[in-house]
Image: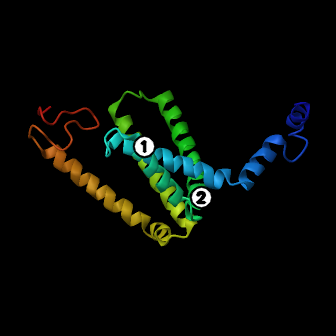
């Protein structure tokens, strides 16, 4: 106990303290490379199977399938490598989104409908950047393709969004594609 407190107090003096040593030991035994990815994949597959109710209320079958999928997923080095590439980038992306949301909350009414659409668009762009960066760092050819062609893809997406907006704006039917625009105009009522 006292040794741990002394180590904690000496973190600033030494390169690493007991916390750094503990993480290094966990890394050596495969905690970050195998156990955490296994638990994440198991939990996701089990949760999806439980929600979908593919096997009714039989949680034993859901658990067995989730266990098999999680064990098969971590048998190769691909999954731990992918997780070690994507989650640090995801953490940075979430920090950027949080900082943007704080700034928006300071200066603009967060209840305004346009803010929701803008935040969703920024979140989608950041998500695409994280996926492309991860693909590039994994050596996938699509990562390099995105780096070469991202301007074209964004142009096509903008043209498609404009077409959808024009079609939705010109629609006077009861059920348009988007019943209300981001500025609150109700096209179904002709307002």
As helix, strand or loop, the secondary structure at mark 1 comes to: helix
> 50 or 64: which is nearer to us?
64
Which mark's residue is nearer the viewer, 2 or 1? 1
- Depth check: 162 or 39 in front? 39
The circle drawn on residue 182 is none
Residue 33 position within the rendered picture, expressed as x and y whole percent measured from the top left: 64, 55
The residue depicted at 51 percent of the width and 70 percent of the height is: 140
Q: Residues within 10 Å of mark 2 (few under 14, many from 20)?
A: many
Split into 4 quadrants, where in the image is the N terminus?
Answer: top right
Q: Residue furthest left?
A: 173
Q: What colouring method underlies this structural image?
A: rainbow
Q: Is residue 176 above or below residue 107?
A: below
Write down the residue under mark 2: 80
Q: Is residue 50 left or right of residue 28?
A: left
Say whether disc 2 or disc 1 marks the residue closer to the N-terminus.
1
Q: In the picture, residue 116 is in which quadrant?
A: top left
Q: Residue 149: x, y in percent?
A: 42, 68
**Residue at figure coordinates x 43%, y 51% from the top left:** 65
Q: Secondary structure at mark 2?
A: helix
Whole-number angstrom distance, CA of label 2 to CA of label 1? 27 Å
Residue 177 at what x, y percent from top left?
18, 44
Query: Is residue 113 visible from the viewing direction of this image?
Result: yes
Q: Which residue is mark 1?
A: 60
| 187 sits to left or right of 145 | left
- Residue 52 x %, y %: 32, 43
| Residue 154, image quadrant | bottom left
Are discs 2 and 1 less than 8 Å apart at CB?
no
> Residue 63 occupies which quadrant of the picture?
top left
Position of residue 179 in the picture relative to residue 110 (left or right): left
Image-based side of 146 in relation to 23, left or right: left
Crowding at label 1, few (<14), some or many (≥20) Cα neighbours within 10 Å? Answer: few
**At 51% from the left edge and 54% from the top edge, which residue is drawn?**
70
């Amino acid at each position: 106990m006292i040794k741990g407190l002394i180590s904690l107090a000496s973190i600033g003096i030494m390169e690493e303290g007991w916390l750094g040593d503990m993480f290094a030991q966990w890394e050596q035994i495969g905690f970050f490379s195998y156990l955490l990815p296994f638990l994440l994949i198991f939990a996701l597959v089990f949760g999806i199977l439980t929600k979908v109710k593919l096997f009714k209320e039989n949680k034993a079958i859901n658990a067995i399938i989730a266990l098999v999928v999680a064990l098969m997923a971590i048998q190769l080095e691909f999954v731990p490598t992918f997780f070690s590439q994507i989650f640090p980038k995801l953490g940075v992306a979430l920090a950027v989104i949080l900082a943007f949301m704080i700034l928006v909350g300071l200066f603009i009414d967060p209840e305004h409908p346009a803010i929701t659409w803008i935040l969703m668009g920024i979140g989608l762009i950041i998500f695409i950047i994280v996926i492309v960066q991860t693909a590039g760092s994994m050596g996938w050819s699509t990562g390099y393709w995105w780096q070469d062609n991202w301007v074209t893809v964004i142009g096509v997406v903008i043209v498609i969004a404009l077409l959808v907006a024009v079609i939705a704006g010109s629609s006077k039917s009861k059920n348009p594609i988007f019943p209300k625009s981001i500025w609150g105009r109700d096209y179904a009522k002709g307002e």
